Structure formats: C-alpha cells, structure tokens
Image (tube, rainbow, N blue to C red):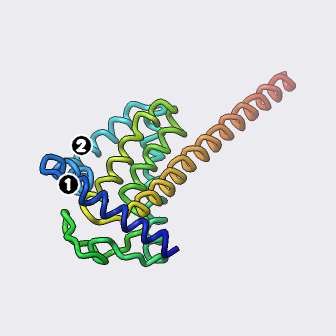
Amino acid sequence: MSALLGLDQELFLRLHYGMQADWLTPVMIFFSQGMKWLPVRIVALLLWLYLVWRGGKARLFALALLPALALTNEACDLLKVWTGRERPCVALDIEALTGKLVSGSFPSAHAANMAALAGLLFAVVDKRWGLAFLWLPFVVGLSRVYVGVHYPLDVFGGWLIGGLFGFGTGYFLQKWLQHRRQKSIINKVNYQQEVSTHD
C-alpha cells in the first residue's frame, strides 16, 4: 500500500506542476469550484426544474439524480473519515489554488458526483447521453488535482464510487418502475376478467 501511495504522490506532483498554465488556471478553478458559486447554482436549479417539467426520461433522470447524489456524498463522507488520508495541500508543501482544505482526501466527492451524473444518464436515458457527458467527471476530477486538493487515486476512487451509485440508482429505479407497470397490467387484466365473468 505504501508503494501505491508513493506512486500516487509522484503522479500528483507531475500533474499538479506539469499542467500549470496561466490560461488554464481559471478554467480549472471554475470546474473545481463552480458549483459553489451562486450564479452556477441558479443555472443548475433552473436546468433541473426544466428537466422535471419536460417529463419522460428527462424527469426520471432529474428526480433520480437527488438520491444518487445523496448516496454518493454519504459514501464519500464515510470513506473520508474511515481512510483518514490527508489532502496533498495538507500533507505536502504546496498551496492549494482554491484555499486549504483540512477534510479527508479519499475519495474526491466532486469527481464522484459528476461520475454519478454520467452513470445515471447511462442507466436512465441512454448510452449516447452517458458517453456525451463522460468528459465532465474527467475534467472535474483533473481540476481537483490541478488546484492541489486531491491525489489522482482520490479522483479515481471518486469516479468508481460515483459511477456505481449513479448507474445503480438508475438501474434499480428502472427495475422498480418496470415491476409496477407489470403489476398494473396484471391487475387490469384480472379486473377485466372479473367484469366479464359477472356479465
């Protein structure tokens, strides 16, 4: 394990310092911190409300996104406490571009949340939409390394956890809805048979 963590730290240093560029820094800060900014949150809320209003798979995705993100965040919080890994901006002599964070490092909840979104798209909408949004967890995860608050292994763990919870939530929701539809059809058929018998 120590060897793996050592490689992870080395890869972090290569990526963190190797990618630094004046033009790239504001982009990475946006992807790393954007959801904490009020205008971005307002846009995200309006988009969510639009998806609910649109109905169909869009509404199903929007409504399923809430439990998917809640489960993902809860799992990340538990793992952060359980693993107790310090963030690179705490353990190493570097300054995080978004301010020093002292909470646990593994896994990255930001990367996990975006992976959950993509995984849910795969399960509820279709594979094309899931593939179309794979760039989002990748860029957000990379941005967390860039700004100095996560190791690559934290990001990879976040992708894995978020993808599983996102896809899993969508999969079980689909199965539950399918079961309800089948049960409704069976009840309707039984009712029609009873009416025919009485006639």
In front here: 8 or 79? 8
Q: Report the residue marked by disc 2.
A: 43
Residue drawn at point x = 35 percent, y = 54 percent: 141
Q: Which of pointers 1 and 2 indicates the residue nearer the eye?
A: 1
Q: Report the residue marked by disc 1.
A: 20
Residue drawn at point x = 14 percent, y = 46 percent: 23
Residue drawn at point x = 44 percent, y = 58 percent: 158
- Give the residue type that dot 1 points to: Gln
Q: Is residue 79 left or right of residue 52?
A: right
Secondary structure of the residue carrying numbered label 2:
helix
In front here: 164 or 13? 13
Q: Where is residue 114 in the image (x, y as percent from the top left)?
A: 39, 49
Residue drawn at point x = 21 percent, y = 67 percent: 96
Q: Measured along the vertical axis of the image, is residue 105 above or below residue 163?
A: below
Residue 80 has which mark? none
Distance, label 1 to label 2, CA atoms, is: 29 Å
In front here: 182 or 103? 103
The answer to whether the residue labelled 1 contacts the one labelled 2, judged by CB atoms less than 8 Å apart, is no
In front here: 49 or 152? 152
Q: Measured along the vertical axis of the image, is residue 43 above or below residue 85?
A: above
